[in-house]
Amino acid sequence: MLSILQAAGWPIIPLVLCSIVALALIIERLLSLRSDRIAPGNLLDEVMTVTRSNLPPADTVNKLAENSVLGQLLAQGLRACSTEPRIAEASLRRAFEAAGRDAVHTLERNLNALGTIASAAPLLGLLGTVIGMIEIFGATGAASGAAVEGNPAELAHGISVALYNTAFGLIVAIPSLMFHRHFRARIDAYTLQLEQAAERMVPHLLRLSSTSRR
């Protein structure tokens, strides 16, 4: 492998760096997008049970926000109700929407970088191949026509070395693209789950707010 990288020349260096960055981003997203860190299964039901009669204290809300991304969303709604006990439905929904935008931004962190690598890696590989071909034909152009015809094996070897860049670019791009699509689908599913949680929480908090007015 080292000899192949050396033979491919300097254009393969950006591809090696892209492969390292892509691997790091994939590992980071796999760890960050676990369900227990985004939307634990029973968290919403537990919060609705705890807030059935009154709002929890600030310490409990802060712990909820540290629990997960869904916890941050629910904590924002609870804080809005604590700040404005007679909160209107429109204001409560705006609070959840703002928290939802922050949550989606957190979920999509580093995803654009992975998508950029998936798109750029084949182009970098093609660039390396073109540069290699220019160098090969530039070198053979300096020789006589008889010399070129007398060394077809050497010319073929040079072309195969130049194609290493394209192959390596595809090796980097294909898994990057697959994981990018996978993470995008997972984020869409989490976004829907957060929206459904907010929709369940809004009438619950409004009932709690109307009860506290009496």
Image (cartoon, helix red, strand yellow):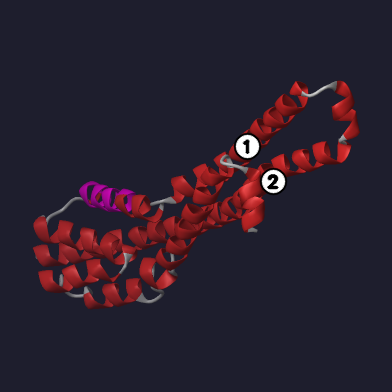
State yes or no: residue 97 in magenta. Answer: yes
Residue 195 point in image, percent of width and height: 39, 56
What residue lies at 40% left-to-right and 64% top-to-bottom?
Answer: 32
The kind of secondary structure element at disc 1 is helix
Front residue (pair 204, 182): 182
Position of 156 compared to 55: left or right? Answer: right
Kindly indicate the quadrant of the structure image that contains residue 157: top right
Dot 2 alpha-carbon crowd within 10 angstroms: few under 14, some 14 to 19, many 20 or more: many
In the picture of the structure, the residue carrying the numbered disc 1 is 128
What residue lies at 34% left-to-right and 54% top-to-bottom?
Answer: 106
The kind of secondary structure element at disc 2 is helix
Residue 8 visible in this rendered orientation of the protein: yes
Dot 1 alpha-carbon crowd within 10 angstroms: few under 14, some 14 to 19, many 20 or more: many
State yes or no: residue 50 in magenta. Answer: no
Front residue (pair 11, 135): 135
Position of 130 compared to 140: left or right? Answer: left
* Rendered position, 193 above or below 154: below
> Which labelled disc corresponds to residue 164?
2
The amino acid marked with disc number 2 is Tyr
Segment colored magenta: 90-101
Residue 200 point in image, percent of width and height: 35, 63
Measured in 3D between alpha carbons, the distance from the residue under mark 1 to the one under mark 2, in whole angstroms, is 8 Å
Chief SS of the magenta region: helix
Residue 20 point in image, percent of width and height: 49, 55
What residue lies at 27% left-to-right and 77% top-to-bottom?
Answer: 49
Residue 57 visible in this rendered orientation of the protein: no
The amino acid marked with disc number 1 is Gly
State if disc 2 and disc 1 touch (CB < 8 Å): yes
